Image (cartoon, rainbow, N blue to C red):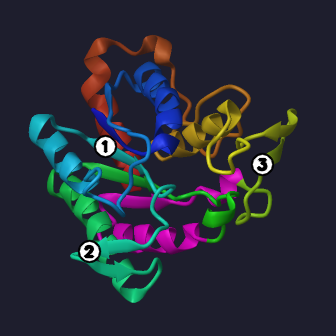
Amino acid sequence: RVLLVGDSLMQGLAPHLMTSLKRKYKVETMDLSKHSTGLTYPAFFDWPATVEDAFELEPYSVVIVFLGANDPWDMTIHGQYIRFGSERWREVYRERVARIINTASQHRARLIWLGAPPMGREDLVGKAPTLNAIYAEEANKVPLFARFVATDPTLTADGSSFTKFLELPERGSVMVRTDDGVHFTTQGHRLLASLALSQFGAATTAGVPATTVVATDTATRTANDTTTTQSNMDNKITQ
């Protein structure tokens, strides 16, 4: 089973992942994504605790996390104001990220943390790198179980800046981000799904550039192959 964790960015991505994982790997997926959530305000929604609770109810082999759009804000802890990006802010945020990663690793589940994409909304511009640095550093502490996957190279024209339209092979200019400067179009979700699934050794969705493709004859697969398929997925992630 695969556990999906995230905010409204994951809510848009989840249906693409769920369909492809079911079709390609015969794997069930639990989507816990919830809009307007993140790691900055656990009093509103506590993701580390939610992930811990999820593992208490069901075993999961893989966790995919896509958070950050609601996190580049100042915090208030016990009445103390903590400015976004400050040393104290990074310390607190890092603890929350680590708690999710450690929960997955303690249950021997592989975790894929998708990086926050560059944002086009004025109050979010330039803030994603602060979050991504923390995600990457914490994932690197448990390389056997966790992997940070940057989304910038897939979703931007220059590898780092917000890009609303991308030039795709045989497609021309395609809109991948919505007018709010945060969310994705259907084509953007397809690109993200392809990126996430490439971590399993498979790319999906016709017409979307594939990062890594595994030649698999799904027509010859039977229900008895499910255990072997799950093992292969785990091996791909840890490579």
Q: In terms of secondary structure, where does tag 2 sit?
A: strand
Counting every numbered tag in the picture gives: 3
Q: In terms of secondary structure, where does tag 3 sit?
A: loop
> Which amino acid is tagged 3?
Lys
Q: Is residue 58 left or right of residue 204?
A: left
Q: Which of the pair 158/131 is nearer the observer? A: 131
Mark 1 = which residue?
A: 62
When asked about the image quadrant of residue 194, the answer is top right
For marks 3 and 1 on the same chain, the one whose residue lies earlier in the sequence: 1
When asked about the image quadrant of residue 187, the answer is top right
Mark 2 = which residue?
A: 77
* Label 1, residues with CA under 10 Å away: few <14, some 14-19, many ≥20: many
The disc at residue 54 is none
Q: Residue at x 50, y 40 (%)?
A: 197
Q: Which of the pair 33/72 is nearer the observer? A: 72
Q: CA–CA distance between discs 3 and 1? A: 30 Å
When asked about the image quadrant of residue 75, the answer is bottom left
The C terminus, quarter of image: bottom left
For marks 2 and 1 on the same chain, the one whose residue lies earlier in the sequence: 1
Q: Nearer the viewer, mark 3 or mark 2?
A: 2
Marks 3 and 1: CB-CB under 8 Å? no
> Which amino acid is tagged 2?
Ile
Pinpoint residue 158: horizontal percent, then vertical percent: 79, 63
Which contiguous range is marked in magenta?
127-155
Q: CA–CA distance between discs 2 and 1? A: 32 Å
Marks 2 and 1: CB-CB under 8 Å? no
Whether residue 9 is situated above or below residue 68 in the rendered picture: above
